[in-house]
Amino acid sequence: MSPEIYSEVFSILKVLGNKYIDVVPKDMLNTIKNSMDINYQPKYTIDTISKEKIHPEALAIIAYLNLQFWHKDIDEDNIINILCILTLFLQIFINIHLNHKKENFEILLLL
């Protein structure tokens, strides 16, 4: 995976906040940080993230983190963050539908 993917993942994690970052295993978080492109640091916000073009691979990593660590933590306080994650998943499906690229289908299978 390209370093830009990891930069996008870390930027998304920053939008989600410490409540989400803190449950990601330290070794996994360190891998993401150490693999990032230091010259590419997207600036997402909770208001703009759904309008951003995000690599499908970055979305797949966020989907994995959601399935492994975050899906158990649903309450009123974090519903906006959950909606943000669901928006990212929707982007994967839109990308698959519009582009019909083989790699997009492979990413979907990982979910």
Image: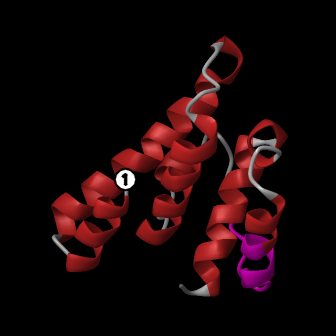
Q: Measured from the top left, where is residue 1 in percent x and y?
A: 53, 85
Residue at (28, 71) in percent of width and height: 106
Residue 3 shown left or right of residue 89 in the figure? right
The residue to which callout 1 is attached is 91
User: For the residue labelled by badge 1, is the local secondary structure a helix, a strand or a loop?
Assistant: helix
Can the viewer see residue 43 in this picture?
A: no
Can the viewer see residue 4 in this picture?
A: yes
Residue flagged by tag 1: what amino acid is it?
Gln
Q: Report if residue 33 lies within the magenta region.
A: yes
Quadrant the C terminus occupies: bottom left
Number of numbered discs overlaid on the protein picture = 1
Q: Measured from the top left, where is residue 58 in percent x and y?
A: 53, 66
Residue at (82, 70) in percent of width and height: 30
Q: Is residue 67 above or below residue 75?
A: below
Q: Is residue 67 above or below residue 41?
A: above
Q: Measured from the top left, where is residue 87 in percent x and y?
A: 44, 41
Q: Where is residue 31, by image quadrant?
A: bottom right
- Dominant secondary structure of the residues highlighted in magenta in the image: loop
Residue 45 shown left or right of residue 63 in the figure? right
Q: Which residues are magenta?
A: 31-43
The colour scheme used here is: secondary structure
Of the pair 84 and 109, the residue shown nearer to us: 109
Of the pair 72 and 54, the residue shown nearer to us: 72
Callout 1 crowding tier (Cα within 10 Å): few <14, some 14–19, many ≥20: many
Q: Measured from the top left, where is residue 38 in percent x and y?
A: 80, 84
Q: Report if residue 38 lies within the magenta region.
A: yes
Residue at (37, 53) in percent of width and height: 91
Residue 21 shown left or right of residue 85 in the figure? right
